[in-house]
Image: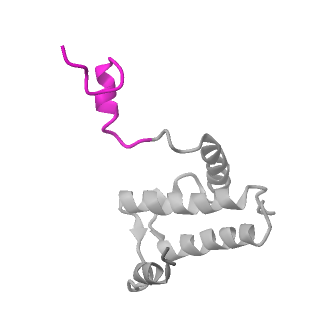
Amino acid sequence: MTAPAYPDDNPKTLVGLKKPPIQFIPPSAIVFLGQAMADGAKKYGPMNWREKRVSTSVYYDAGMRHRMSFWDGEDVAPDSLVHHLAHSMACDAIVLDALVTGNLNDDRPIKGSLPDLIVQLTKKD
């Protein structure tokens, strides 16, 4: 008899291994993200981006402000008392959800060549 093509004897494993993995998401990140999403739900209504279209630029700007505030030494947003990086994750989560639900106004500028520039300027060994 040959060994099964999965790490245990449960056939559910074979099906589960084909699905997108969730196990690599740090639980602490989910907790922080939940705080930021709850703050947004309180301010703007829960899942409001599924009711009305949202613009990429608005969430890009908000996420970058939170990232820059964190980078500049401030951990927690003073208005919400939620970690800046959690707010940044929330902005990205909303854009991704709006993208897959068809509610995203993709107002990014015309595509540039940044990925090529990064490759070009990356130091070689």
Q: Residue at 66% across / 54% down in the picture?
A: 36
- Residue 102 pos. (x, y %): 35, 62
Whether 81 is drawn above or below 22: the answer is below
Residue 52 located left or right of residue 71:
left
Q: Position of residue 78 (x, y in %)?
A: 81, 63
Task: Choose between 45 and 40: the one closer to the eye.
Answer: 40
* Magenta highlight: main SS: loop
Work out whether residue 96 or residue 24 is closer to the camera in this orientation and state it. 24
User: Which residue sits furthest left?
Assistant: 1
Along the line of sight, the residue nearer the viewer: 51 or 39 = 39
Q: Work out whether residue 60 can be spotted.
A: yes
**Residue 96 among those drawn in magenta:** no
36 versus 118 height, above or below: above
- Say if the magenta span includes residue 18: yes
Q: Residue at the location (40% across, 85% down)?
A: 113
Left-right relation of 86 to 114? right
Residue 70 placement: quadrant: bottom right
The front one of 59 and 8 is 8
Q: Quadrant of the N terminus?
A: top left
Residue 118 position in % (x across, y down): 47, 79
**Image quadrant of residue 60?**
bottom right
Q: Is residue 66 above or below residue 101?
A: below
Q: Give the residue at the far top of this rendering.
A: 1
Q: Which residue lies at the image location 60% right of the left edge and 40% below the top edge?
A: 27
Disc tally is 0
| One can see residue 51 in this view | no
Indicate how the structure is coloured in the image.
Answer: one colour
Q: Position of residue 11 (x, y in %)?
A: 28, 21
Q: What segment is highlighted magenta in the picture?
A: 1-21
